[in-house]
Amino acid sequence: MEQAIVLAGCAIGAGLALIAGIGPGIGEGYAVGKACEAIGRQPECRKDVTRTMLLGCAIAETTGIYGFVTGLLLIFVGPIYLLGFLG
Amino acid sequence: MDVSINGSPIYFTIPVLGGIKITASLVNTWLVMAVLIALAWWLGRGLTVRNVSRKQVVAEYIVTTVQGFVDGNMGPKFSHFAPFIAGLFSLSALSSLISMVDLFSPTADLSTEVAWALLVFGMITFTKIRTSGVFGYLKGFTQPVPVLTPFNIISELATPVSMAFRHFGNIISGSVINTLVYAALALASHGLLSLLFGWLPGAVGEVVRAIPFLQVGIPAVLSVYFDLFSSFMQAFIFCMLTMLYIASAAEED
């Protein structure tokens, strides 16, 4: 019974951790949209805008990656570690 | 149907200092390093001023591109960083690309990225201390008001953590999704073949129904993004962040 609760908790936690993907999705979409606007206005600085946008996207992605790593830990490491406490 | 997603397999353990584990990521890093060293040696051999060979044009193009890139992002004061950045980029890119020939990619192991990120963190701290002295470096944590000191320390420590996790997360997410897609395609092709060739009896039917024909070609589309694009992208971002952090660490405030 306790084992089932631990496994269910890990699975639910992993699902909840991946909600973190919403933020970067919206943020990156907004950034790319703005970059498109900038390129449309000044096509000659397309290279710089694209480079800056990709870098900004990578940094905005960090929180999503944290959520993803947390989810991975909960799925692959959490059950082994937590079930060790139950014996 | 079993889907297995494992970390780096351990080949053998050297029984000193409590056991040094030789993992696949370690061996593959050596492989990548050997390939890069051989490539660098081959490209840098027999350079001439006149009658430039095609190989030398490629080598010169790489060197001038990296030099221009580093000078453009860090300023001419840091142009001696170009070999380091080029080395970091090629090591990172090739380590990720190695998964395309079905070897365990060293960048899918968090230890690799943590090592790189700690190296970069050491360089950032060194540059900061060299710019403003030990006292100035420590004083920088109490800016703008001393109440913010804990937060400044956390944000300082978050730099290597986020660099390592960003690279690791992007590569491992690609490999996890690829594994799931392969498993799903095997299942789908089994179901489809059972529908078509369910009438084939005995061992012949078993063999025919077990052919995972959907796995041919379809994962390659995903691989273009997750292996090819993501590898270069993450290597580029890692080098870009390294350059930006080091260059901003050298700014006097």
Image: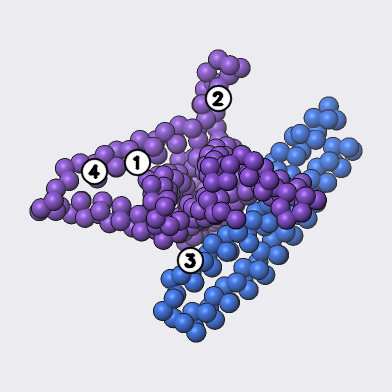
| Callout 2 and callout 1 share a chain | yes
Name the mark nearer the viewer: 4 or 1. 4
- Please report contact status of discs 2 and 1: CB closer than 8 Å, yes or no: no
Crowding around mark 4 (Cα neighbors within 10 Å: few <14, some 14 to 19, many 20+) is few
Of the 4 image quadrants, the one containing the C terminus of chain B is bottom right
Name the mark nearer the viewer: 1 or 3. 3
Residue B75 is tagged as: none
Which element carries disc 2, helix, strand or loop? strand
Q: Name the residue under label 3.
A: A51
- Please report contact status of discs 2 and 4: CB closer than 8 Å, yes or no: no
Q: Out of B156 and B147, give the one closest to the viewer.
A: B147
Q: Out of A72 and B184, give the one closest to the viewer.
A: A72
Question: Label 1: chain?
Answer: B
Give the alpha-carbon distance from disc 4 to disc 3, as whole Å. 30 Å
Which residue is drawn at the image coordinates 33% and 58% (left, top)? B65
Question: Label 3: chain?
Answer: A
Which residue is drawn at the image coordinates 52% and 66% (left, top)? A52
Amino acid type, callout 4? Gly
Amino acid type, callout 3? Arg
Question: Label 4: chain?
Answer: B
Q: Mark 2 points at which residue?
A: B21
| Callout 4 and callout 1 share a chain | yes
Q: Name the residue under label 1.
A: B36
Q: Give the chain coloured blue.
A: A
Mark 4 / mark 1, whichever is N-terminal:
1
Percent across and percent down for residue A78 are: 75, 39
Which residue is drawn at the image coordinates 30% and 56% (left, top)? B64
Q: Give the chain coloured purple.
A: B
Q: Name the residue under label 4.
A: B44
Crowding around mark 1 (Cα neighbors within 10 Å: few <14, some 14 to 19, many 20+) is some
| Callout 1 and callout 3 share a chain | no
